[in-house]
Image (spheres, grey):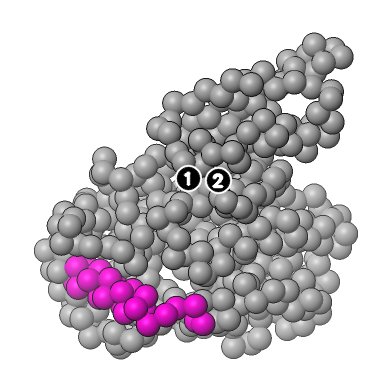
Amino acid sequence: MLISRDVQSENFLESDVVNDDFFYSIVERKLNITRDQFKVRLVLLVPAVAKTDSYMSNVYRVKIKVEILDTKERLNVDVVLKVLLAIYEIFGKFGIFERECLLYEDVILSLEKIWLEKAGEVIQFAPKCLKIESNPYEIIVLDDLKVNGYEMMDRKIGLTAGQTKLALTKLAKFHAASAVRYQKDGILQDCLERMKSITPEMKRPEREKLGITLMQLYQALIDYLRKYGDCDEYADKILCWNKDKILHNWIRVVEPMKCGMVVLTHGDYWLNNLMFKSNDSNEPEDVQMLDFQSSYWGTPSLDLHYFLISSVHDDIKVEYYDEFIEHYHDEFEGSLMKLGYDQYIPTLDDLYEDLLDKSEMVAMSMLYVLISAKYESNQEYDLDYLTLDVEKDPEFFERTFGNETYKKAVTAWLPLFNERGYLDRML
């Protein structure tokens, strides 16, 4: 079998793992045939994402060219290959591979089944998982959605109102089905409970390094807000934030709603983890989710803050903010009712109260999510905040907080954050 690729050699691609058996097993699962019925003629690998995008994995698009032996028919099997990056080994301590495998092999399938059995609706939340390898490399093989007309939108531009509402509808259905499953089965595994998954594994040196890095980002945000002009009011308020909250908000924001509602959050619900399919009139008709490395039981507000702040077009995100929140609530409430959820269903006021209660996520969004979404440089993006060394890369803050795309995004949000009291929650 010939393997062709236009990527630089990677250790795992040169390893014994990526062999004939690896690709034959993918074809068997995808086509539901045995390997004596076909022959793999060629495997093509190309990068699926740019180096300037923010990912904790190497992601490759793979085309396996197959010949069916009986009929001599030639077929293409298209998949996506995800390999956890070795440089982010620290994240392995947080169980991200274990968690994502659990989502693809069990949870997502069960949520789709809940929709089929309880509401008679066929819903697909994510691409089908075809193969998982854990030793010596952590690899997940997925169906390639691009072959079926799905595409990723430009993170620097953001989503239209139609795309945003479609993504919120899919998120509401995901949350609702997860609430039904939680009611029946509880947390399932400790890796889905953030306090159990993260807190015991964060050793003191790692906590200290994370704290130093977040403080660097925090100070840089204040410095750049003062450079923007007309943002001194917000910079003054942010300067008074409680530093401990900045460090710990990434744990607390997954606490359940005060009314008791618990959903499975996606945890990283933003434009680069979504693929949209449009109809012949170029109207969005479906969206599917990618990357479940950060999924935990918690509150819908985490995904809502994360998504709306990072992923909506700057020209509409503030004007339509309440309309988007109300759209999500309508879809969430309606979904829970369709699925026969028999506990208290949060009202729109409950949701707004929770958004305020979890508005510490706004701080993390400005310090992390938004700079990832609006990063604008030809230089590779360094996601590993635990090893960020600004002295070795003095232009890092200028590329992140200093670029015009980030400036436009954050200055559009700040008046709304301030008006809603989100900035005051960190005092």
Q: Could you say where residue 152 lies in the image, as x and y percent from the top left?
A: 50, 41
User: Mark 2 is on which residue type?
Assistant: Lys
- Look at the image and tell me whether residue 82 can be seen: yes
Q: Is residue 262 magenta?
A: no
User: Mark 1 is on which residue type?
Assistant: Asn
Earlier-in-chain disc, 1 versus 2: 1
**Callout 1: helix, strand or loop?**
strand
Residue shown at the point (53%, 73%) measured from the top left? 301
Q: Residues within 10 Å of mark 2 (few under 14, many from 20)?
A: many
Magenta part of the chain? 199-222
Q: Is residue 214 magenta?
A: yes
- Reading the image, the residue beneath label 2 is 82
Camera-side residue: 409 or 59? 59
Q: Which mark is residue 58?
A: 1
Quarter where residue 224 is shown: bottom left
Q: Could you say where residue 413 lies in the image, as x and y percent from the top left?
A: 33, 65
Residue shown at the point (34%, 67%) measured from the top left? 386
204, above or below 189, in the image: below
